[in-house]
Image: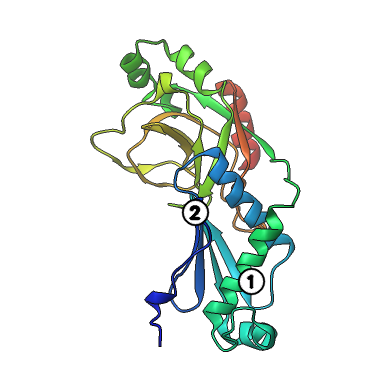
Amino acid sequence: MSTFADKVKKYDSAGIGISPLGDAAVTIRLGEAICPQTHERVRQLADYLDRHPFAGMVEYVPSFLSVAVYYDPCVLLDAHGGSSASGDARDPYALAVGLMKGVLAELEQGERKPPRIVEIPVCYGGELGPDLPEVAAYHGLSEQEVADIHSSADYLVYMLGFAPGFAYLGGLPERIATPRRSTPRLSVPAGTVGIGGDQTGVYPISTPGGWQLIGKTPEPLFLPAANPPTLLRAGDIVRFRPISRSEYDRREGARA
């Protein structure tokens, strides 16, 4: 009899694979490098599962390279156990693998959903972006040049994690990539925009953090009463729009 570990299966030779994640989930690996091509596969799979959840699916969680799909083994067996193509009709994992292989085959023929464009207003510098002078000095640029470069790019939301509503954004121009602070802050205010290495992002809640803080947005990113409870989703394109301090104060005051 094969062991649970023996059931790890390769889907094909293109960096795509399906493997168990505990006893009630599978991980679908969709590439070997963090890049737009791998992310497109992750996004397509997530979009498909949104539209076509299978009986027994509990939830899915996308990441940089993969999607974890959680299922209820009992419901999966009741709904699909009588017609398993795997030959093991009483094995929930084998059923899940068979279902996900079918989904991946469907994706090859599916249409791509256009990404959402999300604009986030940012007031750069001053007390809202205390590390902007340091970032500018590190690159031999003016503070305005750093703000202009940061707000000129389109950023891809690869995944959410770390904190509720925190989006990992790809696309930071190399000209302003800056190492993290040597000493992290104990508390970074919600809405603060930061640079950490070759990444940028917005702190959705107050939390410790070691990124270089260059500005702040009055736009809430974590929306606990909404569905979904986050402003950003994997696959979105983010554009930062510079605003004045007076506009920031006005919009912040309107939320109070």
Left or right: 146, with 186 as reference point: right
N-terminal of the two: label 1 or label 2?
2
Above or below, comparing residue 63 to residue 87 in the picture: above
Above or below, comparing residue 126 to residue 29 in the picture: above
Point out which mark residue 13 bears. 2
Check disc 2 and report its element: helix, strand or loop. Answer: loop
Near mark 1 (Cα within 10 A), the count class, few <14, some 14-19 or many ≥20, is: some
| Dot 1 amino acid type | Leu
Left or right: 158, with 143 as reference point: right
Considering every residue shown, the one lying at the far left of the view is 182
Q: Is residue 233 visible?
A: no
Q: Is residue 89 visible?
A: yes
Point out which mark residue 99 bears. 1
Residue 53: percent from the left, percent from the top? Answer: 69, 68
Near mark 2 (Cα within 10 A), the count class, few <14, some 14-19 or many ≥20, is: few
Query: What coloring was used for the rendering?
Result: rainbow
Residue 240: percent from the left, percent from the top? Answer: 58, 28
Look at 52% across and 48% down and name the residue there: 159
